[in-house]
Amino acid sequence: MVAGKRALQTATGIFVGWGSFQGRDYYVRQFRDMKIILDIKLLAPCLVEFAAACGETLARAHARSGDAVAISGYLGKGSQFATALRDFSRLYADQNERDHAQLERAVAAGKVASAPGW
């Protein structure tokens, strides 16, 4: 957990760590002083930029989590990986739309509670 957290962060948090006490392992971190819940209506105009920031964070984590030379050798220089990633992303987006439609039907039928504005 801690190794993954440190891979995701651009700067290593000094308050992220782990330890053992009386035979049990513990994960330690400092909570932020402020948390936010995004209003989707406010986020919508910036969704492309938000998605790009999420993608950059994920890419940074993956870049730090392995041997860059080995990963580069595995991916090669052609466009095959990019094409496969594009195709997978489109299929996954379609699945997300189906899942969301199913969720909307469940909310409308009263099977799932909804929290408007969330």
Image (tube, helix red, strand yellow):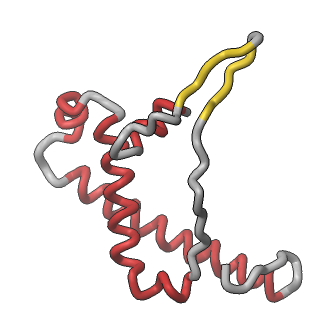
Q: Which residue occupies the extreme left position in the image? A: 77
Above or below, 26 relative to 52: above
Give residue 24's quadrant in the image: top right
Q: Is residue 27 left or right of residue 51?
A: right
Q: Which residue occupies the extreme top position in the image? A: 23
Q: Nearer the viewer, residue 87 or 115?
A: 115
Residue drawn where x is 31% and y is 63% of the image: 86
Q: Which residue occupies the extreme front position in the image? A: 33
Q: Nearer the viewer, residue 97 or 114?
A: 114
Above or below, 92 relative to 42: above
Residue drawn where x is 52% and y is 34% of the image: 16
Q: Nearer the viewer, residue 33 or 101?
A: 33
Q: Is residue 16 left or right of residue 23?
A: left
Where residue 79 appears, as percent x and y from the top left, is: 16, 54
Where residue 90 appears, as percent x and y from the top left, is: 40, 69
Residue drawn where x is 72% and y is 77% of the image: 103
Where residue 39 appears, as percent x and y from the top left, is: 58, 81
Above or below, 85 relative to 73: below
The C terminus appears in which quarter of the rendering?
bottom right
Q: Which residue occupies the extreme right position in the image? A: 110
The N terminus appears in which quarter of the rendering?
top right
Q: Is residue 17 left or right of residue 27?
A: left
Where residue 5 appears, as percent x and y from the top left, is: 48, 39
Above or below, 44 relative to 67: below
Q: Give the total of numbered labels.
A: 0
Give residue 113's quadrant in the image: bottom right
Residue drawn where x is 11% and y is 45% of the image: 77
